[in-house]
Image: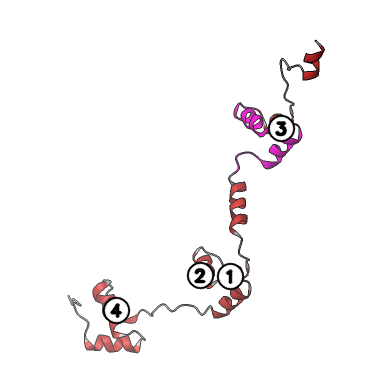
Amino acid sequence: MDWDYDLTEEDYQKAISNGIHRERARERFYNLGWDKERAITEPINKKADRSSWIKIAAENGITRAAFNTRLQRGWSEEKAATTPKQSFAFAQKKRHQEMRKYPLECLEEAVKNGITEQTFRRRVREGWTYEQASTMKSYQRNPKPSRKEMIKK
């Protein structure tokens, strides 16, 4: 069995003819543990030319770093270059709305009906439906007499 423990001058020449520098072939074979054939024949990954997309991104107020981050997150080049950046406050508000436990419409309906948010939340925790919790008026068992009523007595 022929063991390939070293790269020969012939291997280096083959690597150079394949567009692979000597040091790159050496690094692949000795440090990265690639087999000899792969180390001297596999083409080097070249970065795609994205200069036109970077220019478009800059025209849209998107920095090169933001563009690259978007690509790393799986965005297409077009989307990464053309989608406007969001302000921090907008993104924070959007994230807060996505994390809401109760629908905003129901809370607004409750407040409109004179029900506090605290009462609405308590009712939902106690098993009420959103509709019941936001529409059924609160009542007092023993309403306190008004100041005028107290003076009359």
Q: Quadrant of residue 122?
A: top right
Residue annotated with mark 2: 65
Q: How many marks?
A: 4
SS for tag 4? helix
Tell me the magenta residue range. 100-128
Estimate the x, y position of residue 10 in percent, counting from the top left: 24, 88
Which is more toward the observer, 87 or 80? 87
Return the disc, 2 or 3, that comes first in the chain's sequence.
2
Q: Identify the amino acid type marked 1.
A: Ile
Question: Please, what is the three-letter code of the amino acid marked with disc 3?
Answer: Ser
Q: Nearer the viewer, mark 4 or mark 3?
A: 3
SS at mark 3 in the image = helix
In space, the residues marked 2 and 3 are separated at their CA atoms by 46 Å
Upstream in sequence: badge 4 or badge 3: 4
Query: Which of 142 and 37 lies nearest the eye of the viewer?
Result: 142
Q: Earlier in the sequence, mark 1 or mark 3?
A: 1
Q: Is residue 112 above or below residue 19?
A: above
Indicate left or right for 45 with 110 as reference: left
The question of residue 120 being in magenta is answered with yes
Residue 5 shown in magenta: no
Q: Which mark is residue 37?
A: 4
Spatial separation of the CA atoms under disc 4 and disc 3: 72 Å
Q: Which residue is mark 3?
A: 134
